[in-house]
Amino acid sequence: MKTKKTITDSTVDPDILAYTVGDDPVLDRDLVVWDAMGTAAHVTMLSEMKLKRPVVTKAEAAHVRRELGRIAAQAEKGAFEIRVDDQDVHMAVERVLTERLGDLGKKIHTGRSRNDQVAVDVRLHMKDAILRTEAELVGLASQLGAFGCASGPIPLVGRTHLQPAMPSSVEMWATGHAEMILDQLENLEAAYRLADANPLGSAAGYGVPLPLDRDRTTKLLAFARPIHNCFGASMARGECEAALLSALAQLMAVLSRLAEDLILFSMPEFAYFKLPRAYCTGSSIMPQKFNPDVLELVRSKAAQVLGLQTAALSLLHAMPGGYNRDLQDCKGLYMKGLVLTRTTLRILTKVVAGLTVDADRCRAAFTPGVFATDVALAKVADGMPWRDAYHAVRDQFAALYDGRPAEVASIDPDAAVAAKRHAGATGGIDHALYRRREAAALKRVATRLDALLSARKALFA
Ligand code: ARG
């Protein structure tokens, strides 16, 4: 039997190696800079341990950190190679450090396992990615806000059961979707807080007989706290991936509903909104076609992210305590979830920026029924009890529905929109509220991203 020698000095059958390595050499490219950061913090902490014989001296640690900085810079240019023989980023970095630094490179893994190492990498990568996702989410919300107010107040038929219901406006529709999107920051925040805890120092999941200073690496890596229990730290792998996927799945469901409204309202039968021609794709046989494929694919991506969340939880739910290799497969799931969600946020921002409104079509869609509730409420203003007013109007519409003659009152759509002035109604939408929420979110993102990237820069200095 042919076997292959790896850094762990075991010999593994090439087919078994390929199967167990899976997509790691490709997926782990996104982890190289974070792996280098984690190793820089670990080596710094090792050099500060009070031992009779230091594992590495402070000067050696500085040497390793500089080399890690070079590896990170190489990775950012796409020039750091992870080979199948390396198995993953962790052993690729150790191999390269050993090639460049000799025995010093062989010392960096002292008191550490790939189990706590990969958990750190994933959490650092995730923190960075969540923050960037949040900024993109805010970008879409503010684009919707701009779309809603761009052409002044335009009435839009509000629907329930898809049937005409009450007067709404383009502004209400757009900022309503924006608010749902901004609310998703709460779920992303929960995922961020879970990810913002340091598993480093838990080693294989049971600690090591060395005086590791876990608070020190927590500080160096800009984590909010360490995960205290070493076994707990190993159990937490996969959990924050699943939590993030859950937040992404929910966000995607919100985006999918936005896409669905856009598909509907840009159909020729509605034609309230229009997509730029360049955003529509054609048919190979029907020359008249300008299809909203881009929005249909938003629905499909939402379905896929939900599937990824289900896959992560399915992978976790029956796994025994401690590290199991199943966990490796969680990595591709959350990374795919991030890619699908972030590309969707960016494409929807572009679609919304390109949308135009046909104000005449919007106004022409108002049928008398849309004003029925307002008409009944006008009777209340004249002193009629609500239920009597309701029945009076209801009887007229029942007659119309049955094809009998009836006279129904109507209201001017613009007047109906302006008349509802209470908080959050068509005439009472507070745009400043959205601007404030967006600004606060962006400020928080910038502060956190700066803390993370400054910590990384400091470690490579
Ligand atoms: N690539 C592995 C993963 O993502 C690294 C950890 C391997 N640990 C182990 N005990 N085999 O899970």
Image (tube, helix red, strand yellow):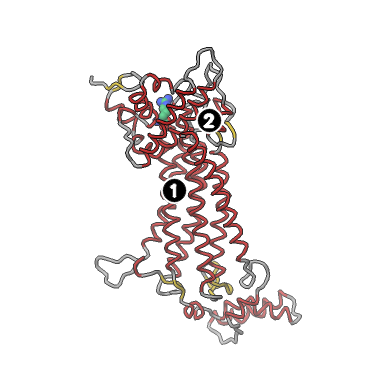
C-beta proximity under 8 Å, tags 1 and 2:
no
Q: Amino acid type of disc 2?
A: Pro
Q: Is residue 284 visible?
A: yes
Q: Residue at x 56, y 26 (%)?
A: 214
Task: Find residue 286 and report its image quarter.
Answer: bottom left
Mark seen at residue 360: none
Tell whether circle 1 marks a residue whose Cβ is less than 8 angstroms from ligand 1.
no
Residue 364 picture location, percent across and down: 49, 81
Mark-to-mark CA distance, 1 and 2: 26 Å
Q: Is residue 325 visible?
A: no
Residue hosting label 2: 199
Q: Is residue 299 left or right of residue 182?
A: left
Q: Residue at x 51, y 72 (%)?
A: 150
Which is nearer the eye, 375 or 129?
Answer: 129
Instruction: State ligand 1's quadrant.
Output: top left
Mark 1 nearby-residue class (10 Å; few <14, some 14–19, many ≥20): many
Which is nearer the eye, 155 or 161?
Answer: 155
Which is nearer the eye, 283 or 127?
Answer: 127
Residue 341 picture location, percent across and down: 44, 51
**Residue lying at the far front of the rendered structure:** 59
Mark 2 nearby-residue class (10 Å; few <14, some 14–19, many ≥20): many
Quick one: quadrant of the N terminus? Answer: top left
Q: Secondary structure at mark 2?
A: loop
> Which of disc 2 and disc 1 is earlier in sequence?
2
Residue 165 picture location, percent across and down: 57, 72
Mark seen at residue 305: 1
Up the image or down, 242 lies above or below 7; here it is: below
